[in-house]
Image (cartoon, rainbow, N blue to C red):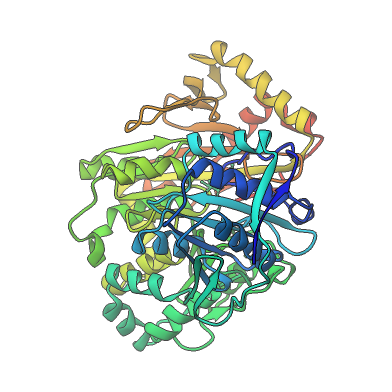
């Protein structure tokens, strides 16, 4: 075994987006493409000698090949230990958990999250820092800068390692330890939630379906729900992880998890339904005949946090991304704790969590999490809901309706226009930005504009500033139209239009969502000329 220095040239476009570098698998298969990015990570980290690194991915196509390369490069950079999930598998939350628990310098996550997988699908890589969370922008920008000047990478020429047998192997001077993918994570969950109460719930005949979408969370859900909590076999559906996710789109929303939604709408529906995404960090919560919006789910968990042993002491604060509905703000106000509004991207929650300013965080994109790790966590949210259902004895629908009756309902929807021509999408945003100055105070339909701006965020901890994080048009009654371009797509541009309308009157809480939002949808259409500019009569996906 020797360490090779291989000459290379920069690739364009290796700037990490909302959550790491995401590209087509074929791009990652180009000689040197992955190596350059990994070298840029190690160059950014500096001296890695004596350090521990954690590596794992969501099991999608190219996961194993990429991990073999990363292990050989880690050995060439003098890491003392690399912990790798068995079979190369670690869900994103499990990786965050292992980094924190094992005192690692950081971790490398191989995933393109909810994006489709397979040879023609997407792949991704992300670096997480010692707190277990995604690297902040100053690090991702430094990584990008290194990719643009790179001339060589260092790699051991050792042969492939066995990723399936638990235990230690040696690569150059580095110990590679294959660890159980689930154990550390399951232990953390058992410490946060009332497993005895959930076990008793299942023993009483409570029924549930967890849709693993053939992605990474299946094995975690089986071990915890069907194993530790005694849910009957068959509770976890689509629970076998496949390299192409069975050809599906592992994004847990009512459109992509249509099978689960149909099951939950049937007369003999189970009591509770849930789904997670490609890398296990997203969650969708469904009751009989009702799917809970991620924004409502965050607000409901915040209002009821004390049911779970891990949160019995109360919550210090809540954070949500700017496009997420303001339902959580109302709960925070009543609890007398702060609510922070951050740009889209879980990385923006890290400082708030580290500083102890918030306990719970959430995003409209089906992400919810807490101080327990520094990633959003799909199964954690499902267990939180199970804990709430077990302790309250209520149904999902009852919990949601009672929440609305108490706090009011924030009708909410996101309209996505996917794979739009990049120039058209940027043109739309530019034209909208130009209108902002004139919009304040304007009357639009039944609404008066109270604020129209391009969201900028100053991190309250390190005071870093992030600008151009999305256009928001806020009406005097709190209703909002928000537009931004996705930072996770790999084809053209994806325009996200977010709509929110507050309704205090419980007599008006059963209106179909799109109907409740129709006035705002029409205004957004006129302001943006989205149909004409994109050539699309309707959004690709409505959630
Ligand atoms: C990532 C980020 C989230 C973000 C989501 C959508 O999630 O971690 O914070 O909300 O992408 O981002 P965008 O609107 O830019 O596409 P994931 O689950 O894809 O890692």
Q: Answer above or below: position of 304 versus 509.
A: below
Residue appearing at x 78%, y 33% in the figure: 534
**Is any atom of residue 94 visible in this view?**
yes
Quarter of the image with the N terminus in it? bottom right
Q: Nearer the viewer, residue 481 or 25?
A: 25
Where, by quadrant of the figure, is residue 257 drawn? bottom right
Residue 236 appears left or right of 477 = right
* Residue 126 image offset from top left, x and y in percent: 56, 50
* Residue 183 image offset from top left, x and y in percent: 41, 76
Q: In the orientation shown, which residue stands out farthest toward the left? A: 313
* Residue 243 image offset from top left, x and y in percent: 69, 70
Residue appearing at x 74%, y 40% in the figure: 11
Residue 241 appears left or right of 477 = right
Q: Answer above or below: position of 230 versus 282.
A: below
**Is any atom of residue 485 visible in this view?**
no
Residue appearing at x 63%, y 14% in the figure: 434
* Residue 361 image offset from top left, x and y in percent: 38, 48
Q: In the orientation shown, which residue stands out farthest toward the front? A: 2
Q: Nearer the viewer, residue 16 or 439?
A: 16
């Amino acid at each position: 075994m020797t360490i090779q220095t291989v000459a290379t040239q920069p690739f364009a476009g290796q700037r990490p987006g909302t959550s790491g570098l995401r590209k087509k698998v074929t791009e990652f298969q180009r000689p040197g493409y992955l190596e350059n990015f990994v070298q840029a990570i190690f160059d950014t980290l500096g001296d890695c000698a004596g350090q521990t690194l954690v590596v794992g991915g969501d099991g999608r196509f190219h996961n194993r090949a990429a991990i073999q390369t990363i292990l050989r490069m880690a050995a060439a950079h003098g890491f003392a230990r690399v912990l790798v999930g068995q079979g190369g598998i670690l869900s994103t939350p499990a990786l965050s958990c292992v980094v924190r628990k094992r005192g690692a310098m950081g971790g490398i996550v191989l995933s393109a999250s909810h994006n489709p997988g397979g040879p023609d699908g997407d792949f991704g890589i992300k670096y997480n820092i010692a707190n277990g969370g995604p690297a902040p922008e100053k690090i991702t920008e430094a990584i990008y800068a290194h990719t643009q000047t790179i001339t060589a990478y260092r790699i051991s020429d050792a042969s492939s390692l066995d990723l399936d047998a638990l235990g230690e192997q040696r690569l150059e001077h580095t110990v590679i330890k294959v660890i159980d993918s689930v154990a550390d994570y399951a232990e953390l969950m058992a410490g946060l939630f009332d497993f005895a109460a959930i076990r008793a719930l299942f023993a009483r005949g409570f029924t549930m379906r967890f849709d693993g979408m053939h992605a990474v969370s299946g094995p975690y859900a089986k071990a915890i729900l069907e194993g530790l909590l005694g849910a009957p076999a068959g509770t976890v559906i689509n629970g076998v992880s496949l390299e192409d996710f069975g050809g599906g789109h592992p994004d847990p929303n009512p459109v992509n998890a249509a099978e689960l939604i149909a099951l939950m709408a049937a007369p003999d529906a189970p009591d509770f339904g849930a789904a997670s995404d490609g890398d296990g960090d997203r969650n969708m919560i469904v009751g009989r005949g009702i799917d809970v919006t991620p924004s409502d789910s965050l607000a409901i968990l915040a209002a009821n946090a004390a049911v779970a042993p891990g949160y019995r002491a109360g919550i210090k604060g809540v954070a949500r991304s700017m496009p997420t509905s303001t339902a959580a703000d109302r709960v925070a106000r009543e609890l007398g704790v702060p609510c922070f509004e951050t740009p889209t991207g879980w990385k923006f929650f890290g400082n708030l969590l580290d500083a102890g300013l918030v306990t719970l965080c959430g995003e409209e994109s089906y992400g919810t999490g807490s101080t327990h790790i520094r990633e959003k966590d799909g199964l954690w949210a499902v267990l939180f809901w199970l804990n709430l259902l077990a302790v309250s004895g209520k149904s999902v629908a009852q919990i949601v309706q009672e929440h609305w009756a108490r706090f009011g309902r924030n009708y909410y929807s996101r309209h996505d226009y996917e794979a739009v021509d990049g120039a058209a999408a940027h043109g739309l945003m530019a034209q909208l930005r130009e209108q902002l100055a004139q919009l304040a105070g304007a009357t639009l339909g039944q609404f008066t504009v109270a604020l129209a701006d391009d969201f900028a965020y100053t991190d309250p901890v390190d005071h870093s500033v992030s600008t151009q994080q999305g256009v928001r048009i806020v009406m005097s009654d709190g209703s909002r139209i928000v537009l931004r371009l996705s930072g996770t797509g790999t084809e053209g541009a994806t325009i996200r239009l977010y709509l929110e309308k507050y309704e205090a009157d419980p007599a008006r809480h059963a209106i179909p969502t799109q109907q409740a939002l129709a006035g705002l949808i029409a205004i957004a259409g006129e302001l943006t000329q989205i149909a004409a500019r994109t050539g699309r009569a309707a959004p690709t996906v409505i959630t």
